[in-house]
Image: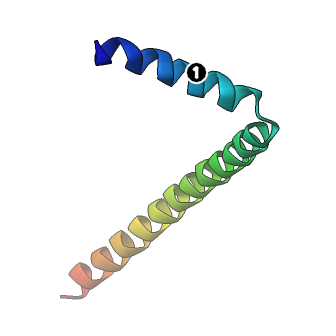
């Protein structure tokens, strides 16, 4: 019987959260943060590619020297 109450409570909380203006602001901030994180991941990926190429170049030069 408790398992039937859980979904209705969850739905009630979700509806209350959706109607709250503060929730809308929190969601907006969450979307902004997610866009910033996506941009950071893209930048880190580019830095990782450059760094990997740099160390590969150094490794090649060291190997040729020996």
Quarter of the image with the N terminus in it: top left
Q: Quadrant of residue 18?
A: top right
**Residue pushed farthest bottom?**
66
The residue that appears at 25% across and 87% down in the rendered structure is 65
Q: Where is residue 8 in the image (x, y as percent from the top left)?
A: 48, 15
Give the structural element (helix, strand or loop) at label 1.
helix
Q: How many marks?
A: 1
| Above-or-below relation of 8 to 19 | above
Query: Which residue bears the numbered disc 1?
Result: 12
The residue that appears at 22% across and 80% down in the rendered structure is 63
The residue that appears at 35% across and 11% down in the rendered structure is 4
In the image, is 63 to the left or to the right of 50? left
| Above-or-below relation of 16 to 57 | above
Q: Quadrant of residue 46?
A: bottom right
In the image, is 42 to the left or to the right of 1? right
Camera-side residue of 65 and 53: 53
| Above-or-below relation of 10 to 41 | above
């Amino acid at each position: 019987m408790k398992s039937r109450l859980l979904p209705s409570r969850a739905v009630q909380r979700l509806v209350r959260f959706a109607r709250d203006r503060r929730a809308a602001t929190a969601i907006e901030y969450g979307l902004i943060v997610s866009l910033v994180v996506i941009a950071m991941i893209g930048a880190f990926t580019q830095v990782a590619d450059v760094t990997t190429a740099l160390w590969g170049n150094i490794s090649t030069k060291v190997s040729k020297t020996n």
